[in-house]
Image: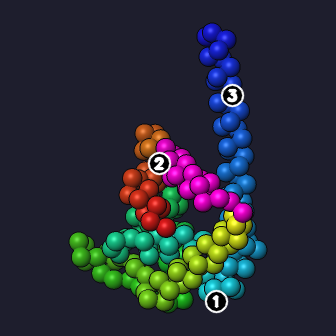
Amino acid sequence: MSPPEATAHQVDAAHIVELEGALARVAYLLTRVRRHDYAMVKCGVTMDRASVPLLRLLADAEEPMRLGELATRLDVEAPHVSRQIQRLEKAGYIERIPDPDDRRAQRVRPTEAGRTAVDAVRDVQRHWMTEALADWSTEDLKALAVLNHRMVDGFLAHAEQIGDLGASARESRTLRAD
């Protein structure tokens, strides 16, 4: 390997390390218990942190989903999804319906209360982001959104390459719809 190639590779590795650290900080900030609790109080919704992404996924889905599909999409174990579905159903946020393809199976979908809860949570989260990024220019916000979508698309493509079935091109489109 010639010296210029080695230098370029080292620079890329340093940027990857920096990016990984930044993503870890973002993930931590977005999933903090206090932030979740604050959001729930602000939007008047009672829901645990694990239920939010599940209900969001159901609200964004074009049709009701089976629990196994939810587990795959969220990349979690099926019993975890079952527990969350029971909590969401008890709270009135989702309902079970017969699976038209298999009479023995069921699908789940959000109720009107569930859709309202998702909208309320999104409003609070978007308000928080708006305040946090208030001094960013429109151009910077647009560039950040474009680069984040590009990064997620790259992560999803790589996940599909290595056989990580929790990721799909459809998820990428769903994520962009938010």
Q: Nearer the viewer, residue 108 or 112?
A: 112
State which region is magenta.
135-156
Residue at left offset 25%, top offset 73% = 102
Q: Quadrant of the N terminus?
A: top right
Q: Earlier in the sequence, mark 3 or mark 1?
A: 3
Query: Which residue lies under the disc numbered 1?
Result: 44
Q: Residues within 10 Å of mark 1 (few under 14, many from 20)?
A: few
**Residue holding disc 2:** 153
In the rendered view, tell whether residue 105 sits above or below residue 24. Answer: below
User: In the image, 143: left or right of 154?
Assistant: right
Q: Main secondary structure of the magenta part?
A: helix
Q: Residue 108 placed where, x, y %? A: 39, 78
Vertical position of residue 57 compared to residue 15: above or below: below
Determine the residue located farthest toward the top in the rendered image: 2
At 68% from the left and 79% from the top, the residue drawn is 39
| First in sequence: mark 2 vs mark 1 | 1
Q: Which amino acid does label 2 sit on?
A: Asp
Q: Is residue 170 visible?
A: yes
Q: Mark 3 sits on what residue? A: 11
Three-letter code for the amino acid on which mark 1 is drawn: Gly
Whether residue 159 appears in this view of the structure is no
Report helix, strand or loop for mark 3: helix
Q: Distance between the residues labelled 3 and 1?
A: 47 Å
Where in the figure is residue 50, as x and y percent of width and height? 60, 71
Q: Residue at x 73, y 54 (%)?
A: 25
Find the distance from the CA under tag 3 to the CA under tag 2. Answer: 23 Å
In the depicted structure, whether residue 103 falls above or below residue 46: above
The disc labelled 3 sits on which kind of residue? Val
Task: Where is residue 114? Give x, y as percent.
Answer: 49, 84
